[in-house]
Amino acid sequence: MISLGCQYLTEMKLLAWDTSTTSGAVVAAEWDATAKDPRATFRIVAEWHLSLETAVHSERLLWAIHQVLKACAWDLASVDVFGVGVGPGSFTGLRIGVTTARQLAHTLGKPLVPVSSLALLVRPAARMIANENVLVCATRPSAKGEVFAIWGRPAGLLECVVRADGDRAGIWSKGVECRATEPSVVLGAIAARLKRERGLKWTWMTDVADKEAYRHEGFEAQMVTELAEKRRVPLPPGSQFGVQGRELGLMVWEAVQQQAAREALAVRPSYDRDSEAEVKLRKGELKRAAVE
């Protein structure tokens, strides 16, 4: 049995959402915690795709949560654990999604799982090419000409769920990078890996909602120019349609199995951004301190 707080539970229910971009998801799932193989009993009960506009995140998220609960014939109090995508992503979307999760979980005295939104985004593609020798990169537009980026091998990406936070352990593969930085830094890191590992290939993905922004900024064309096009692996159809509710539900389930759920008020948005000083140092606008 799995212990959450002081209460031992058998039939477990989870409710989770991600609103880190204009394409989001809400999911409900359940499983038998007393089964010899809980994964065999895990099932998605309902999921809802969200097409969100920044100004109405709050309205559509609460409405979607209500619709999912109604489809499951659950009441909110019956949910045992909540999950939320904590970013990186849209400031407004994250603020509303994480705040809603914190308030509901705290009010009901339930644990909350802070899922990496970029790890969630890249999972479908990583799963589709899990057996290939390829470096997968997923990005989202950020501010100040930067991108939110995650890159690693498929097997490693599938092991990324929750980032470590202070003394709180995470579930994260050591070979996976995730941060907000300039496109040139991402391209340089991938190019260096390709140079070191001759048999390694690469691929890139983003939300469909972000595709137009990238075409405008020329990011995809820049990747093709700077990386070896002949080593690019085309992604299968259906792997670039934004976050998927079923993957979110599975990630929250995995976190619960590894005791990575947290107290609700300990969960905050994550922007994975370098500090202002680090950005200036990289641009040569600051000098390194002398070491005697």
Image (tube, rainbow, N blue to C red):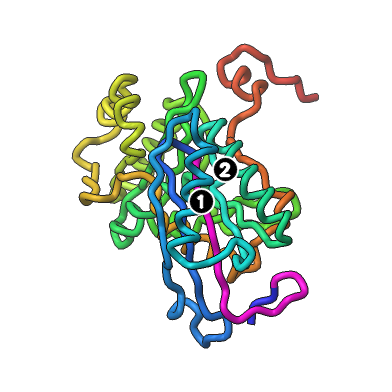
Q: How many labels does the image show?
A: 2
Q: Where is residue 211 in the image (x, y as percent from the top left)?
A: 31, 31
The residue under label 2 is 97
* Position above or below: 58 against 49: above
Locate residue 227: give its quadrant.
Answer: top left
- Verify whether residue 18 appears in magenta: yes
- Report the amino acid beneath label 2: Gly
The residue that disc 1 covers is 17
| Local SS, label 1 | strand
Q: Nearer the viewer, residue 71 or 189?
A: 71
Above or below, 108 against 176 in this view is below
Label 1: how many Cα within 10 Å (few below 14, some 14–19, many 20+): many
Label at residue 178: none
Amino acid carrying label 1: it is Trp
Q: Residue 47: x and y, percent?
A: 41, 58
For the stretch drawn in magenta, what is the main secondary structure?
A: strand
Task: Tell whether label 1 touches label 2 (CB within 8 Å).
Answer: yes
Distance in Å between CA atoms under marks 2 and 1: 7 Å
What is the span of residues highlighted in magenta in the rendered image? 4-19
Is residue 220 shown in magenta?
no
Of the residues under marks 2 and 1, which one precedes in the sequence?
1
Which residue appears at 67% of the width and 43% of the height? 268
The C terminus, quarter of image: top right
Quadrant (top left, top right, bottom left, bottom right) of the N terminus: bottom right
Residue 254 visible within the image = no
> Residue 124's x, y, as percent?
35, 54
